[in-house]
Image (spheres, rainbow, N blue to C red):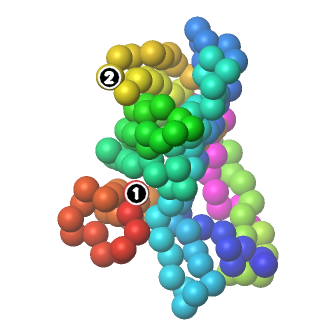
Amino acid sequence: DFGRSFPSLWIWIQTNSFRNNPGTSLFVSLARIPTPIFGLEFPGFTAAVWHDKELIPFATWSGAKFENLSISSEKVFMAMRSSKNRRYFEYRVELTVSRDAPEVLLYAPVNFTKMEPFVHEALLARVHMRLFNGHGDIIFDDIGVNTGLEVHGDVEWLVNNLCENKSRKGWICL
């Protein structure tokens, strides 16, 4: 569809390289998601931690919620709480990603007609991840290296669409 379904802004984080916990992985994607209905867009996210042979989802579809999101030129910080349900236990994750890593320029769809280089991606970022169980006990505290990071577009829109932000304009929030 020449990029018509491509988000206009996003944050993407991914690593499989935690210093003291080989085998642990992290994936996070938040975006302004387009719909085919009257050009409407809404905030959404999907994230997961694989740790100790357990998949821990943090996602819109699983009922997870953002507690905090802040973005600066130096770092991205986010805190999410998973939904407690019959299949999954409750968890909370805090991520601090440094933005001082070198970036490469990637191609992405532009104006629904062509691919052009305009997405900056870091492949050597670092993420500090702390994972808490439902009782608030820290069960994981480590640094992920060789982290992929993209912060693209006016991502402050995501901050403005946190559910805790009473002045948000949309009916769907993070």
Magenta span: chief secondary structure: strand
105 drawn magenta: no
7 left or right of 77 in image: right
Question: Residue 156, position in %: x, y?
Answer: 37, 59
Q: Amino acid at mark 1?
A: Leu
Please tell me which residue lies in front, 86 or 95. 86
What is the secondary structure assignment of the residue under circle 1? loop
> Circle 1 is placed at which residue position?
174
Q: Residues within 10 Å of mark 1 (few under 14, many from 20)?
A: many
Magenta extent: 116-125
Please tell me which residue lies in front, 132 or 34. 132
- Any mark on residue 136, and which? 2
Query: Against 8, is 104 above or below?
Result: above
Q: For the point 31% across and 59% down, which residue is it?
A: 163
- Residue 107 is drawn in which quadrant? bottom right
- Residue 38 is drawn in which quadrant? bottom right
Please tell me which residue lies in front, 51 or 127. 51
Q: For the point 72% across and 74% down, which residue is it?
A: 3
Question: Residue 122, position in %: x, y?
Answer: 62, 40
Quarter of the C terminus within the rendering: bottom left
